[in-house]
């Protein structure tokens, strides 16, 4: 079995606390035409470098029934700045247009097969996976970006077309797994293409 969800796989359920004080489950987002779950964190330079492009994409598609949900699965024992209080502080400061969830047990990261921060998963209205991978081709420095993969995938889907490039390799820092070296990856984790 592949480590990361495969195209057409159904989104696994979750129940996670959010920086907004609520606990959110997959079913809480049932009314959206598309759901983007992305694994992110507080410290990664690839996350920080691409935050504003992700914000612009989230805001651009919000009126078309698209919801973005960030999930931080990084171990606070590996990177203390990825703990929940720092998540709250980050959302207070930046006012990102997404729900920011904390996967402290890392169970959700394992269910989805999150490889890096950021790693994006787009699900259709049936919550089947239609895109997985990077947000764009230069997340650390978006002034060098030539492709916004998220925008392309959402435009294809919302136009009723198949996503032209449904799988890309996420670009970023690896997920920080608890009790492991900061650069450790699960043995069955691998590039998607």
Image (spheres, rainbow, N blue to C red):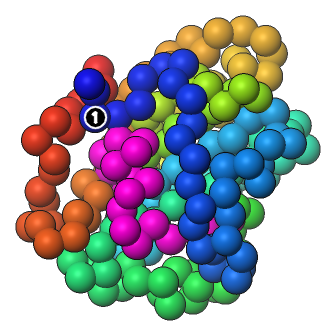
Would you place residue 147 above or below residue 57 in this image?
Answer: above
What is the quadrant of residue 34 in the picture?
Answer: top right
Q: Is residue 143 visible?
A: no
Q: Residue furthest right?
A: 63
Name the quarter where the C terminus is drawn. top left
Please report the residue visible at 66 percent of the width from the left and 57 percent of the height from the top.
25
Find residue 31 and report its horizontal and vertical position in percent.
86, 42
Residue 65 in the figure: left or right of residue 126: right
Total tally of numbered discs in the picture: 1
Q: Which residue corresponds to the image point at 72% horizontal and 76% vertical from the top-left?
A: 22
Q: Residues within 10 Å of mark 1 (few under 14, many from 20)?
A: some
The answer, for residue 34, to whether it is visible in the render is: yes
Q: Position of residue 106 (x, y in %)?
A: 36, 62
Q: Is residue 37 left or right of residue 155?
A: left
Q: Percent x, y for residue 4? A: 34, 34
Instruction: Point out the stretch of residues depicted in magenta.
Output: 99-118
The image quadrant that residue 100 belongs to is bottom right
Q: Secondary structure at mark 1?
A: loop
Q: Residue at x 30, y 86 (%)?
A: 80
Residue under pointer 1 = 3
Image height of 47 relative to 59, above or below: below
Quadrant of the frame with the N terminus:
top left
Residue sitting nearer the eye, 137 or 155: 155
Q: Magenta stretch: residue 109 in it? A: yes
Residue at left offset 40%, top offset 72%: 104
Residue 192 x/y as whole percent: 30, 26
Q: Give left or right: position of 176 versus 91.
A: left
Q: Is residue 110 above or below residue 176?
A: above
Q: Is residue 9 above or below residue 104?
A: above
């Amino acid at each position: 079995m592949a480590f990361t969800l495969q195209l057409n796989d159904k989104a696994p359920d979750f129940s996670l606390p959010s920086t907004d004080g609520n606990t959110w489950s997959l079913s809480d987002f049932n009314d959206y035409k598309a759901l983007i779950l992305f694994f992110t964190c507080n410290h990664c330079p690839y996350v920080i470098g691409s935050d504003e492009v992700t914000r612009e994409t989230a805001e651009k598609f919000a009126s078309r029934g698209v919801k973005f949900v960030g999930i931080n699965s990084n171990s606070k024992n590996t990177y203390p700045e990825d703990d929940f209080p720092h998540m709250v502080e980050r959302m207070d400061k930046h006012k990102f247009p997404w729900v920011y969830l904390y996967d402290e047990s890392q169970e959700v990261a394992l269910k989805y097969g999150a490889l890096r921060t950021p790693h994006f998963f787009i699900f259709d209205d049936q919550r089947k996976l239609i895109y997985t991978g990077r947000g764009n081709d230069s997340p650390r420095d978006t002034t060098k970006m030539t492709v916004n993969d998220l925008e392309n995938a959402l435009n294809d889907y919302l136009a009723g077309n198949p996503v032209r490039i449904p799988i890309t390799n996420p670009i970023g820092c690896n997920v920080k797994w608890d009790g492991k070296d900061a650069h450790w990856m699960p043995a069955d984790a691998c590039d998607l293409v």
